[in-house]
Amino acid sequence: MQNFTPYSAFLGGSLIGLSAALLMYFNGRIAGISGMMAGAFDFKNSENRWRAFFLAGLIATAIIFNVFAPHEPASYSRSTLLLIISGILVGFGTRMGNGCTSGHAVCGMARLSIRSIVATFIFMGVAILTVFITRHLLGVSS
Amino acid sequence: MTKNITALLCGILFGLGLTISQMNNPDKVLAFLDIFGDWDASLAFVMGGALITLATLQHFIFKRERPIFETQFHLPTKNNLIDKRLILGAIIFGFGWGLIGFCPGAVLAAFGDGKIEPFIFTLALGAGMMLFGWFDKAK
């Protein structure tokens, strides 16, 4: 097992959990990123403004963090076409299924929502299968 | 306005969590999904940490009648509904996730990497969301 980082993973995960808990405590909202992305650009509805604030905080932190503690960026060895196809699928699928890793796998599972548990098992399973097929059957690099 | 400030602070924590845990590195995510290869189990600890923390805190939060700055908790009502949309949506998302290793939160946390790929992915993601909007209306 290479590059196994359980401590930073657990710490980071706990911060994600804390963020979701505080958002529920203060605003009564679920920290689902795909839902926020879909709502954040609806400027006409002022009820949506908090979503843009949340996402701005997320992005700003990631940028500032990388200034003070630069890390090796990912290899991005796959083609731009695949990147675009992947992005479209993720956008389409998360809207259709009403959630992504944050909304279903973290917030929904923590509430023991059957819907979210089913969704999480499906998208995890399909993602694992996709990696198996691309890496081990088709031999796509990395 | 207060709700926007609390949302901003929560976003900062969330971004910190994604960055520290390296969820924003698609190589790391693909290594986690590659259970039949050189498996890196780290991201299971991200989910573990998030679930333990959130479930514990929520236990106390939901004892309240309402959140601090809202009149009610906004929770999904159809928690038991398993329909075609949920299943098909999860399949499409899982397929896309497995191709590159970016999910919606993670890609935003990769904006600091100085690479063009996260921006391209986010534009495509937005297009995918709009596409679903049209698809949904047309039905």
Image: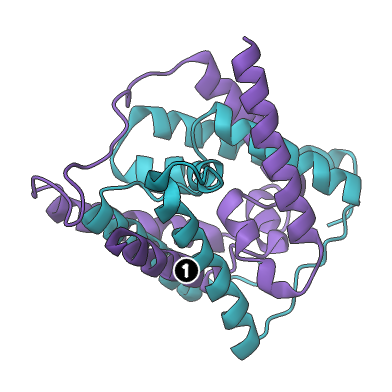
Residue at point 53%, 28% (across, down): A97
| Camera-side residue of A93 and B37 | A93
Element marked by disc 1: helix
Is residue B65 left or right of B103 when viewed as pictured?
Answer: left
- Outermost top residue: B139
Residue at point 28%, 57% (across, down): A21
Is residue A40 left or right of A47 when viewed as pictured?
Answer: right
Is residue A104 left or right of B1 when viewed as pictured?
Answer: right
Considering the image in quadrants, where does the C terminus of chain A appear?
bottom right
Chain in cyan in the render: A
| Camera-side residue of B25 and A65 | A65
The answer to whether residue A14 is seen in the rendering is: no
Residue at point 67%, 33% (across, down): B130
Name above or below for residue B74 compared with residue A62.
Answer: above
Percent coordinates x, y for residue B23 in the rendering: 58, 62
Q: Which residue is mark 1?
A: B17
Q: Mark 1: which amino acid?
A: Gly
Is residue A42 left or right of B123 when viewed as pictured?
Answer: left
Percent coordinates x, y for residue A129 in the rendering: 70, 36
Counting other residues with Cα less than 10 Å from the Cα at mark 1, is it few (<14), some (14-19), or many (20 or more)?
many
Name above or below for residue A58 compared with residue B137.
Answer: below
Percent coordinates x, y for residue A68 in the rendering: 60, 90
Chain in purple in the render: B
- Outermost front residue: A44
User: Residue B3's quadrant in the figure?
Assistant: bottom left
Residue at point 76%, 74% (across, down): B114
Q: Chain of mark 1?
A: B
| Camera-side residue of B44 and A92 | A92
